[in-house]
Structures are given as structure tokens and as C-alpha cells.
Amino acid sequence: MIKVANLSKRIGDVQALNDLSFSAQDGQITGLLGPNGAGKTTCLRTVFGLLKPDAGHAEIDGIDVAKSPIEAKQQLGLFPDPFGLYERLTPREYIRYFAELNGLSGKQAKQAAAKVLDKLHMNDIADRKCKGFSQGQRMKTALAQAIVHEPTNIILDEPTRGLDVMSTRVLRDILRDLKQQGHCVLFSSHVMQEVAALCDQVIVMADGKVVAVGSPDELCQQTGKASLEDAFIQLIGTDEGIAA
């Protein structure tokens, strides 16, 4: 479970987060939905401990991120930009490296890497250099790195950005599998179709605040709109959030 309570963060002249509070439950996919500049990425970076809030706090399975950052991060997997892989490493080497960074011994990291490579059906590319990988291969390698230490919580920031249709479908299936296994999945997006297709709960953000919480259907019912996109536009009070 991921919980943020009264988070505030100013970056330069911008109040990126403004008394932000919400929770993401185990066994659910929770989406942060908002226009550019809403504070989604700042929120996720604060939850992961990359940014220090000016006020408020974030908890991972009841562990305060600011007070116990290492312990909190061990319960958290972060899906990185798939295009930022270390191209001279193979997926097996890359995944083992991050497994050890997350506290596993050399032997444990080797076993965990083998397990996640098998789980994501990556054995055919496990020992190839990442350089030259397709979008889908990069995505799987990045996700394997995020879940190799079996965290209970997974964070993704606009995970389908730059992915083709087939890679996006594979990622969606994997996220649903993680949900079925009881993981807490939290991701940000501004793509309405993605949020509507995946999310059990949607946190609608604008100007660093929560403006609405509910399932896609509940948000449509709340606003009297037929689509999540129309509901979103009404909730944030502008048309700048329309996704292509």
C-alpha cells in the first residue's frame, strides 16, 4: 500500500504539490491522471524518495519514506525509462545488478534474475546485449529490473510513452498479472484510454491537488458524462488535458 499525506513541494516559483493526499491499495491499479504540470511526476518522485517534500509525508507499507528510505525502497519497484538501459549489459546482467542494489546477495540476485526472466518470457534475449533491442524488449527488461526483488508496490511514470501498440498490450497484461498477484500498482498517465482500461481507482490531479477520486465509471457517474475524457475535462475545468 502506498499512502501520501498532505504532501507539499515547491520547485522554483511553482507549487508542484499542494497538500496532496491519497492512498493506493494492494491488489489494485491506481492511476494518477492530470494535464501536464499537474504534479504527477513530482508526486511519484517524492514517493520514491528522489525528492524531499516541503511538508507532509509518504508511506510505503506503513514505512515513512523520509525516515527509513532504504527500508521503504525495498518494498518498492520503479519502472524506469526503457530507453535509458545500460546497452553494454545483457538483461541478465542488468537485472542482477539492480537485484543486488535492492539488498539481495550475489546468489539471491542470480536466482531472482533467472526467475523474473522466466516469468516475463525473456530467456531468448537474456544473454544478448541490450544495444539494438526493440521497444518491447527494452520495456520487458526495464520492468524486470523493477520487480526482480519482488516488491509489494510498483510505480510507473507514463509507462507506455514511446511504446508501440504491441508493447503497450504486453505491458498492460503484465500490470494486470501484478494486480492479480496482490501488488499495489501506481502509475501516472494523461492517456484516457490507458487509464480507463487498466485502473480500479483514478486520482484526478490539477495544480498539485486531488480534485476527484473514483473508478472510471464512478467519475463518469459523478459528472454525468459518458466517457472518462469528458468527465476529466469537467473535473479539471479546462480543455488542456485532452490527450491525443
Image (cartoon, grey):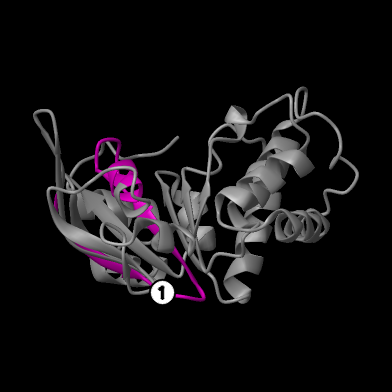
From the top left corner, tell me how far across and down residue 65 is, in percent.
Answer: 31, 59
Image quadrant in which the C terminus is located: top left
- Highlighted magenta segment, given as a residue range: 18-45
Q: Nearer the viewer, residue 75 or 198?
A: 75
**Please, what secondary structure does the residue beneath circle 1 have?**
loop
In the figure, 184 relative to 32: above or below? below
167 or 144: nearer the viewer: 144
Residue 62, picture quadrant? bottom left
Q: Residue at x 40, y 62 (%)?
A: 72
Report x, y in % for residue 233. Answer: 26, 48
**How many neighbours does mark 1 have within 10 angstroms: few (below 14), some (14-19), or many (20 or more)?**
some
- The residue closer to the viewer here, 138 or 93, is 93
Magenta-span inclusion, residue 26: yes
Q: Is residue 84 left or right of residue 50?
A: right
Image coordinates of residue 211 in percent, x first then y, are 19, 58
Q: How many marks?
A: 1
Mark 1: amino acid: Gln
x 55%, y 64%: residue: 151
Q: Is residue 10 left or right of residue 228?
A: left
